[in-house]
Amino acid sequence: MTSYFKSFIFLSSIFCVVSCKSQTIIVDTQEKNSLIINDTTFVNLKEYSQDFEYDMKYATDDNFLKAKVYDCAECFLRLKTVKGLLKANAKFAQKGYKIKIYDCYRPLDIQKKMWEIVPNPKYVANPAKGSIHNRGGAVDISLVTLQGEAVDMGTDFDFFGIEASHNYTNVSYEVKLNRKLLKSTMIKSGFNSFDSEWWHYNLKSGINDKVSNSKWDCK
């Protein structure tokens, strides 16, 4: 009887170990699945990669508005836009470059603030209609080397002259190559360029998303 009881305890222990391990795996899988988020969810780019450089112009007064309109410098985008940027940045890295970020998702309230300062659709999208920045599908970017050195794009960011256009040809051969590299890589990664601004790129599917006024907490 004692021998039978010991055998029962031993077998029960084995069953418990196997069962507990199985339950742990199931819980881990459930936890991972719970982290799967929709492609249209807003996320912070920094939480997905540390391989970008940032110069968030509208979180300072170093911009054409001459005013700080963001409370803090963060780059939030819809997840699908982040995925496109990650793909592009990996391609740039293979050639010795990385993306420099100037602006990302822009809440509608910020768009309204910009419109109050410069109510001109040539420079600022009318908030009554909204822009792809307000949809989380647009980025303003440039390139730097992997060591952080600037890459010549011919004009500063937010220079609203003809010289900033992709179609403007009276620039140096180096600038032509740099703009071509930026444009071709971004297009291959799912973005469209904006002819008059070498820095502006829209995720091709971003136009289908709704204008948003979601905001992030500044830490």
Image (cartoon, helix red, strand yellow):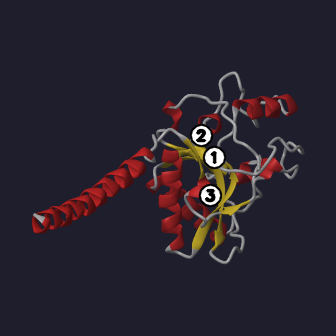
Which of the 4 quarters of the picture holds residue 132?
top right
Determine the secondary structure under disc 3. helix
Q: Amino acid at mark 2?
A: Gly
The local crowd at label 3, few if under 14, some if 14 to 19, many if 20 or more residues have their Cα within 10 Å, is some
Kindly identify which numbered label has been placed on residue 46. 3
Q: Give the labeled residue for mark 2.
A: 136
Dot placed on the residue nearer the N-terminal end, 3 or 2: 3
Q: Position of residue 5 (x, y in %)?
A: 15, 62
Q: Residue at x 51, y 46 (%)?
A: 79
| Alpha carbons under labels 2 and 1: distance apart | 7 Å
Q: Give the labeled residue for mark 1.
A: 76
Query: Position of 173 compared to 25: left or right?
Result: right
Q: Position of residue 147 (x, y in %)?
A: 67, 78
Q: Residue at x 87, y 33 (%)?
A: 117
| Alpha carbons under labels 1 and 3: distance apart | 9 Å
Dot placed on the residue nearer the N-terminal end, 1 or 3: 3
Q: Can you say whether 173 is above or below 197 in the image?
A: below
